[in-house]
Image (tube, helix red, strand yellow):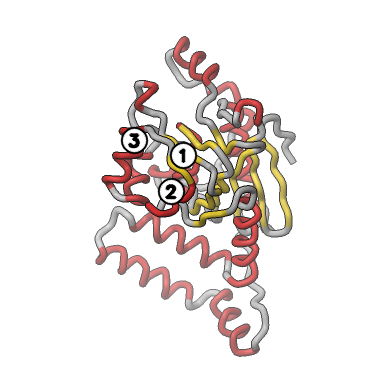
Amino acid sequence: MQDYQEIRYDIDGPVATITLNRPDQLNALTDLTQAEVRHALAESERNQNVIGSILTGAGRGFCAGVDMNALGEMSDAGKNLSERFDHLKANPGNPLGDPNYNGSPTYFLGLRKPLIAAVNGACAGLGFSFATFCDLRFMERDAKIVSSFGPRGLIAEHGTSWMLPRLVGPANALDIFWSSRKITGEEAFRIGWANRLSENGDSATEAANYLRGLAETSAPSSIMMMKRQVYKHLNRELGPAMAESTEWMNDSLGQDDFKEGVASFVERRPARFAPILVEE
């Protein structure tokens, strides 16, 4: 397994946890951090025992955004400098080859497996974008999100202008972008950005328990296909989305997972579903 410098990558049964590990900088993102996250997610995709991954932060913060020193370097160079970490290049998702899933963090949507943000503290800037593009967000009461784009003279970055309104509605999205005010866990849960409101210190544990529940009850192939349906059909009209879902549904009826799902129900026993196989 890769020896990471700025993240921790831990596997406990069916759950992989990626911990941004720069607590003294509130886990601010460098190019190396981002390359390591992508590489670790590729590891999760290939590990047949992993049902899904958690993204969280070490210490008292989730992620304070891009490291300001890294921003200064990019400003001086006039470009992104991530090519310095080509040794960590990985292609964790995008099984359909959809160009919508090529960017960062939009590639989170192309992962075959669930990705949950366990927001345990300050979540700002690019860290906010990372959490926004996770499939689910478990947020602690005292954690805070803030967009931080306007005060830096920036616009809504990294696809958040597309994703955030789909989570919280256009008006709430504009409020978050324009005001750049701090939003607590309770408000984030109320407006729909957070899916679970966790007590302080419990978000990662609750996210892990959620994934363990999926591992016990649901076929990995079903989870993958439903994620694919949701994100692919966001931009389609109902008719074409329905037609494609019907095609995929008919295909699933001939798969071993469907036979096992029916058999386990009739025999009143836990199902034994096949893992997702991803080529190296």
Q: Amino acid at mark 3?
A: Phe
Residue at left 60%, top 89%?
Answer: 266
Q: Is residue 194 left or right of residue 150?
A: right
C-alpha separation, residue under disc 2 versus residue under disc 1: 8 Å
Residue at left 50%, top 51%?
Answer: 137
Q: Is residue 137 left or right of residue 40?
A: left
Residue 66 x, y percent position in the rendering: 51, 26
| Most foreground residue, 271 or 258 | 271
Residue 23 placement: quadrant: top right
Q: Which residue position holds label 1?
A: 145
Q: Which residue position holds label 2?
A: 188
Residue 42 x, y percent position in the rendering: 60, 45
Q: Residues within 10 Å of mark 2 (few under 14, many from 20)?
A: many
Q: Amino acid at mark 1?
A: Ile
Q: Which residue position holds label 3?
A: 177
Whether residues under marks 2 and 1 lie with C-beta atoms below 8 angstroms apart, the answer is: yes
| Most foreground residue, 163 or 178 | 178
Secondary structure type for disc 3: helix
